[in-house]
Amino acid sequence: MSYELCSKIKDIMPYEPIAGEYRIRLDANESFFTLPDSLKQEIRDAVSSLDFNRYPDPTAGKLCEAFAKRFGISPEYVTAGNGSDELIAIIIGSFLEKGEGILTFDPDFSMYGLYGEIYGYPVSVLPKKAYRIDVNEAISYINTHDIKMVIFSNPCNPTSLGLDKRAVQKLVSSVNALVVLDEAYMDFWGQSESLLREVQNYDNLLILKTCSKAVGIAALRIGFAVANKNITRALRAVKSPYNLNTVSQTIGQIVLEKKDYLDYCEAKIMEEKAFLETGLLALAKRHGLIDEVLKGVTNFVMLRTAKADEIWKQLLSHSISVRKFPGHLRITAGSSEENKQLLSVLDKILSELEG
Ligand SMILES: *Cc1c(COP(=O)(O)O)cnc(C)c1O
């Protein structure tokens, strides 16, 4: 007997986040805040009284309510997932007919194209222009090819740039395709640029949110999809019933209800981001090796440099991890102390590379 893996997964390799222990982790866009002790105590009490023999609430009802309340929307539009990553996989795997195409952009979050390929849908990739989506070009591409789903992040990972609300509205209202709008970082830019409160006005808009970034609980794997009732009903029906475990539901609810704490963290993270960005802009003035620092709207900064590989390796050797892309580095804002160390080590590395 023999079995061979099918061609689309034969040579695929597992996603490898940076392996190893680093002193300063600025590679995954996480929050640098750990939960305060008082909150941890509240969590311990809540978790210790759970019925571990019982399956989780398949609707994650209380968690979705806490999320809906924080963002001023109705829970009837909300579905919880095991990270927004799981929701991306479910949506791409379920919302298309065989042969229908997916449109993504480059650069953007790499998972979109990956899941498209794994589930066997044709994936088109439009290159961005000066790091930005050309909305008119995207509309005409979608309407002249068999594209039934367009998916992108706004603000964008990895560029940190935001596409203004009116441009997104124009895209959504000009295509006969499902628009999957990943607002993982919108908390940092501001709710006035979000379409979260408008999903019920569209037949074809699905927004993704996550607790892994501004909310600061990446360990718990909690994401949300927000869409009109029709899309939400379908999504709730196709997801696996117990996709989000009771521990995550319980802790997520507790944390999402801490409005003052979350507002404080968001503001503080953006203060640190401003410090990091200013520091990087100053380094770019003094060092020819940094060609550009993108001024973004999220908790991370992207910079363009022909020496991305060398700088990345040197930073690792100082036990600082950042994310590397071809010709670019993406640096998450850390704590004040972490950002200062990053800037000072980077200054040294650049001087050495410049000889
Ligand atoms: C980090 C990130 C996510 C979050 O995924 P989770 O699975 O919820 O942790 C989603 N989309 C983008 C663009 C991201 O950068």
Image: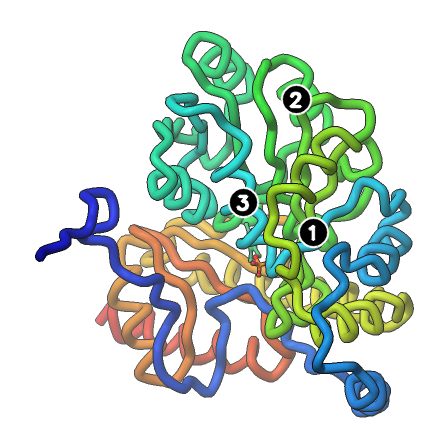
Q: Where, quadrant-wise, is the C terminus in this rendering?
A: bottom left
Check residue 275 in the rendering and tell me which mark sits there, or answer none: none
Location of ligand 1 given as a quarter of the image: bottom right
Ranked by sequence position, the earlier of labels 1 and 3 is: 3
The secondary structure type at the circle numbered 2 is helix
Tag 3 or tag 2, which sits nearer the N-term?
3
Q: Amino acid at mark 2?
A: Val
Circles 2 and 3, Cβ within 8 Å, touching? The answer is no
Q: Is residue 274 visible?
A: no
Which residue is rendered at x = 84% and y = 73% of the image?
254
Numbered disc in front, either 1 or 3: 3
Q: Residue 90 has which mark? A: 3
Is residue 72 placed above or below 56 in the rendered structure? above
Badge 1 local density, few (<14 within 10 Å), some, or many (20+)?
many
Q: Earlier in the sequence, mark 2 or mark 1?
A: 2
The answer to whether the residue bearing label 2 lies less than 8 angstroms from the nearest atom of ligand 1 is no
Q: Residue furthest top?
A: 144
Say which mark, if any, is on residue 224: 1
Tell me: is circle 3 under 8 Å from ligand 1. Answer: no
Quadrant housing residue 347: bottom left
Amino acid carrying mark 3 in the image = Ile
Q: Secondary structure at mark 3?
A: helix
Counting from the top left corner in percent of width and height, residue 211 is at 69, 62
Contact (CB < 8 A) between labels 2 and 1?
Answer: no
Structural distance between the alpha carbons of marks 2 and 1: 20 Å
